[in-house]
Amino acid sequence: MEFRESQAIYLQIADYVCEKILLKDWPPDQRIPSVRELAIQVEVNPNTVMRAYDFLQQEQIIHNQRGIGFFTTPDALKQAARYRRSVFVEKDLPQLYRSLFLLGIEPDELKPGFDKYKKQNFS
Amino acid sequence: MEFRESQAIYLQIADYVCEKILLKDWPPDQRIPSVRELAIQVEVNPNTVMRAYDFLQQEQIIHNQRGIGFFTTPDALKQAARYRRSVFVEKDLPQLYRSLFLLGIEPDELKPGFDKYKKQNFS
Amino acid sequence: MEFRESQAIYLQIADYVCEKILLKDWPPDQRIPSVRELAIQVEVNPNTVMRAYDFLQQEQIIHNQRGIGFFTTPDALKQAARYRRSVFVEKDLPQLYRSLFLLGIEPDELKPGFDKYKKQNFS
Amino acid sequence: MEFRESQAIYLQIADYVCEKILLKDWPPDQRIPSVRELAIQVEVNPNTVMRAYDFLQQEQIIHNQRGIGFFTTPDALKQAARYRRSVFVEKDLPQLYRSLFLLGIEPDELKPGFDKYKKQNFS
DNA sequence: GTGGTCTAGACCACC
DNA sequence: GTGGTCTAGACCACA
């Protein structure tokens, strides 16, 4: 897995888990990879994955069963959507509007690029 | 001036200068506030402004005349647009598409919010 | 480490790192001293080393792995040579030619002095 | 006149005067342009030219006759050569040797470039 | 532990 | 007055 340098790695891992849930790869109330497994898979220090899991636990997207592992919560889907939406509305949107305004771009013009993006992620 | 905590202050100052240029408040090839002046104005340490100016100089948006001060470059408008556009395309857009996709939002739906934003910044 | 007063310390540190690489003391893709370590070693403020590392990173001679440290890039050797060569050609050479011309010296006459210099740095 | 950014402007002006003398454009014991004239000609602040003249006076290359102007000294040629030579030997040479050594260049290899340079400055 | 940022204050050369 | 550099020391997020 490759990481952007504009954001903390642990948050990018948290986002990755959210996406797995939102895309229904990881159903609710089910075991997810252990800290060590995921650390090996995405090639980071286990501490960093642990931090991501901690964060997701606070957001009630996953929870921990001691000695067994981490599980998605029963309403993981709802919580993950809530989290992503809040980030989007509170952080991304204002900056987006500012950039569109300064660069003289209209939201319509984003449509072609977005459709292309969707195609790539469906295949 | 108020700063977001999600980004380094010196980069926010650089963005501020870019906006001044893009909004044509600061025409090309013209003197801009000295390091000390801007530091007082936005209430930060002169070193922080210096760092922003350093950055903008690398991006060829401003340049220095020794012992006199900083000036916008003749093609500051073009360079500032290039810089903002590159940030937008390389950083903002991918994240935006990802969020839209996961949250099931279409670009059209951003239009009302954007129009509202423009009204606020136009008056 | 002793510094000339004719050049900024951070640039002299950057040159020092370049030399370590060109002399193959520091192989490509390998960890280099942390900002604090080098600061203690050459007896300057960590900020000054940081500035040198920043500069070298822009020149693609070193890069950073977050939370771990700075590393020479895989093609550090090539990049360091490119940097030193560009400084030499663009800054040193024109002045050299001018001086040789005005003082009536031929390049051949530099050979004895250069051989002596090499002997000193070889032992 | 264009200035390098690696050296103070007043020193570059001083070098320019030295060259005029060494090239015998300005004979010994003869009036040279006034501070104001030269300032207009090379497009800098008169203070900067004044500083160059001050410096050249210390080096006994020019001298001032109050109310009349600046003159080359009777042995300006000798003094100018002495000054340039000292700068060359003490400052330029050590750096040159270092660069040649690191980049693996031999003094011989400078000859073609130097010959080309001379041709350009003769025509 | 690592780098990254910021402040405060100083000193310098230069214009 | 201007920018440029450096120090000392602090705080932070991150791995």
Image (cartoon, coloured by chain):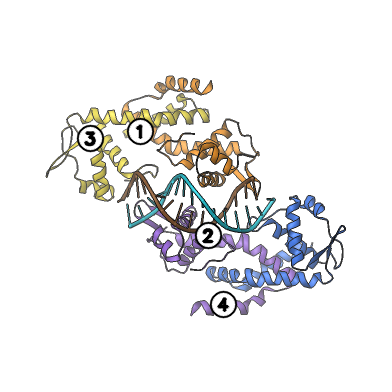
Chain colours: A blue, B purple, C orange, D yellow, E brown, F cyan
Q: Which residue is mark 4?
A: B117
Circle 3 Cα neighbour tier, 10 Å, few/some/many (<14 / 14–19 / ≥20) = few
Q: Which residue is mark 1?
A: C98
Local secondary structure at mark 1: helix
Viewer-nearest residue: C62 or C108: C62
Q: Amino acid at mark 4?
A: Tyr
Mark 3 and mark 2: span between their CA atoms? Answer: 51 Å
Dot label at residue B11: 2
Residue D11 drawn at (x, y percent): 31, 40
Local secondary structure at mark 4: helix
Mark 3 and mark 4: span between their CA atoms? Answer: 67 Å
Picture quadrant of residue F12:
bottom right
Mark 1 or 4: the one toward you? 4
Mark 1 and mark 2: span between their CA atoms? Answer: 42 Å
Dot label at residue D25: 3
Dot label at residue A63: none
Q: Earlier in the sequence, mark 4 or mark 2?
A: 2
Mark 4 and mark 2: span between their CA atoms? Answer: 23 Å
Residue A19 higher or lower than C15, as above or below: below
Q: Residue furthest left?
A: D67
Residue B15 higher or lower than C4, as above or below: below
Q: Chain letter of disc 4?
A: B
